[in-house]
Image (cartoon, helix red, strand yellow):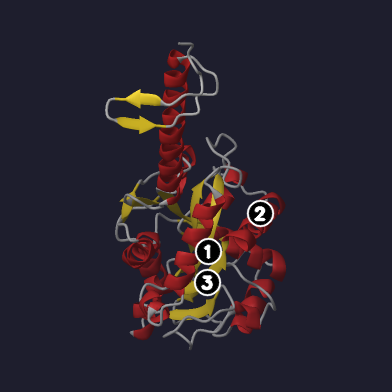
Amino acid sequence: MPHNKNSSVNNNKNNVKVNNGNLPSTGRRAALLLALAGTFGMGTATSSAWAQQAYPNKPVRLVVGYSAGGGVDAMARLLAPRLSQLLGQQVVVENRTGATGLIAGDAVARAAPDGYTLMLGDSSLLIAQHLQPKMTFDPIKGFAPVASVFTLPLVIATSNDFPAKTPAEFVKLLQANPGKYSFATSGVGTVHHLGFEMLKARANARVVHIPYRGASQIVPDVMSDQVSIGVVSVTAAEAQARAGKLRALALMNPVKLAGAEDIPPLSDALPGFSAVPRLFVLAPAGTPAPIVEQLSEALRKVMAQPDIAHVAAQQGAVPAYMPAGPLAADIVRESGEWGKVIREQKITATQ
């Protein structure tokens, strides 16, 4: 009997109709295997794509370039547990100290751009590129900005015997006495230093810079009038000012700090003046946009929590949320402004 290629195939007791497409038996088996492989392949690809979308599915590192207990570290530890609740994964603060945040910056810039390594950076990163020509990373191109979160207001502190008592008197005094007074900051190229250099340029004043190792050395010397002026964080000066041991003469930015509303801003005498360290969250360049957006939105919700301003004020910080897009442009602007101050005032890292 001739073989009918379209006949029924008797498989034991079950008759199954198969349209074999004129393929020989070996071809039919190969086609079935290919079809099954394709089906399983599609399932694997779909599962893989789904897994990639399920961010985050493990702990996230928030790297800080300063030691535990400092202002930046305190803000990271304020953010981390609140961010953990929103992301559904633990956010772990990791301190990578050294070179004013540059060691941490290098580590994060080199990390995998997958959203699991972030940095709480500050304005010093944007300043460093103008003073450190051999930096190992680009603070603008090396990161994907996620969100701005806080500012850390600075205060001009003087002894109680200092002749000026208001921002206007302060500016006039410096203008009338070129080179007579000195100001102390926590180091060359800090926002404290460059902010006062901006003041000097705006007021056309000449004041001598004396770099210190930190506020813990500056405050006692200001109180004893060993140095005329100190530029320190509000928290570093506030307790002594309340005790009447020094004068918190002016804020370096126009936004007043909750709980310290009695400190006037320098912008009262120099309209528009603002010099304030900013804190922002960065991810490695190339981090997928959906992850950046998810993180930015989570940080927006954290910064909108009712108690965040009060808790931050206790650490001398002011909430200052800005989403990823505007932050990217603002980082470029801020970097350019610091670069201009450095060039015009002829500041070098060795001063």
Which amino acid type is marked by label 1?
A: Ser
Pinpoint residue 72: horizontal percent, then vertical percent.
40, 60
Instruction: Tell me: 11 left or right of 166.
Output: left
Q: Residue furthest top?
A: 1
Q: Earlier in the sequence, mark 3 or mark 1?
A: 1
Q: Which one is nearer the viewer's eye here, 16 or 319?
A: 16
Badge 2 marks a residue whose secondary structure is: helix
Task: Report the residue at 64% width, 68% height from top.
Answer: 199
Judging by the rendered image, the residue that carries numbered circle 2 is 332
Q: Which of 155 and 50 is in front in this view?
A: 50
Residue 272's x, y, as percent? Answer: 68, 75
Question: Label 1: which residue?
Answer: 148
Q: How far apart are marks 2 and 1 (CA)?
A: 13 Å
Which residue position is annotated with label 3?
A: 320
- Which residue is at the far left? 13
Residue 89 seen in the current view: yes
Instruction: State whether residue 28 is above or below residue 79.
Output: above
Could you tell whether 290 is left or right of 305 in the image? right
How dense is the environment of label 3, judged by Cα within 10 Å: few (below 14), some, or many (20 and up)? some
How far is disc 3 from disc 1 in space, using C-alphas?
A: 6 Å
Contact, mark 3 vs mark 2 (Cβ under 8 Å): no
Give the answer, above or below, for where 233 lies relative to 103.
Answer: below
Residue 147 percent across, percent down from the top left: 52, 61
Please tell me whether residue 103 is drawn above or below residue 167 in the rendered image: above
